[in-house]
Amino acid sequence: MDTEDYVDLLSARAADARAMMMFFAVFHTGLLVVLGFAGAGLEDSGIQLALAAVAVLTSLWTFFFMDDCMQDLFAIAQDLPEDFQASNVGKRFSDVPLPVFRVVNFVVIALIVVAEVLAIY
């Protein structure tokens, strides 16, 4: 593959990650609006379970998708030619600790879900 193909893959996976972040933000903002305005409607255990399940499952889906995007981005960056890897951007890719990003991604999503589940119950 030539460099342009790698750049196209990087762009596509970065766009995938941005789209997933937007989905997560819009969905969980909507959930917070429901929690804020539902009032007595949240006293039904079925509704509570449904909201909690959706919050947890969409968050797991987002985490796994984002994790896959991050792994792809870093793998593609490592496959780029030597001149790219010697550039400042290439050095940044090689210096970034991917496991830290993966852990932080999980922790942030988990904290959001815990806060939502606590608000539901």
Image (tube, rainbow, N blue to C red):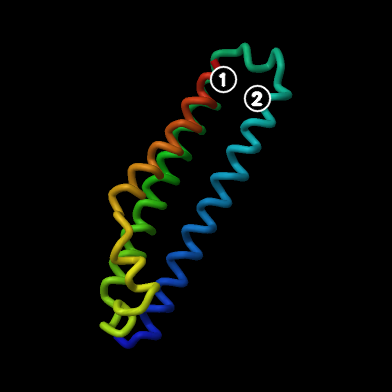
Residue positioned 33% across, 42% down in the render? 103
Quarter of the image holding residue 109?
top left
The residue shown at (36%, 58%) is 70
- Quarter of the image where one finds residue 2: bottom left
Marks 2 and 1 close (CB-CB < 8 Å): yes
The amino acid type, in three-letter code, at marker 1 is: Ile
Query: Mark 2 — residue?
Result: 35
In the rendered image, the vertical position of residue 95 relative to residue 82, given as above or below = above
Image coords of residue 52 (percent x, y): 50, 26
- How packed mark 2 is, by other alpha carbons closer than 10 Å (few <14, some 14-19, many 20 or more), is some
Q: Position of residue 55 (x, y in %)?
A: 51, 32
Q: How many marks?
A: 2
Compared with residue 35, is residue 19 higher up or lower down, i.e. above or below?
Answer: below
- The type of residue carrying mark 2 is Leu
Which secondary structure lies at badge 1?
A: helix
Tell me if residue 40 comes above or below residue 58 in the rendering.
Answer: above
- Residue at 34% x, 55% y is 68
Write down the residue under mark 1: 120
Q: Which quarter of the figure is the C terminus placed in? A: top right
Image spot of residue 119 (x, y percent): 57, 20
Q: Locate residue 48 relative to residue 75 in the image: left or right.
A: right
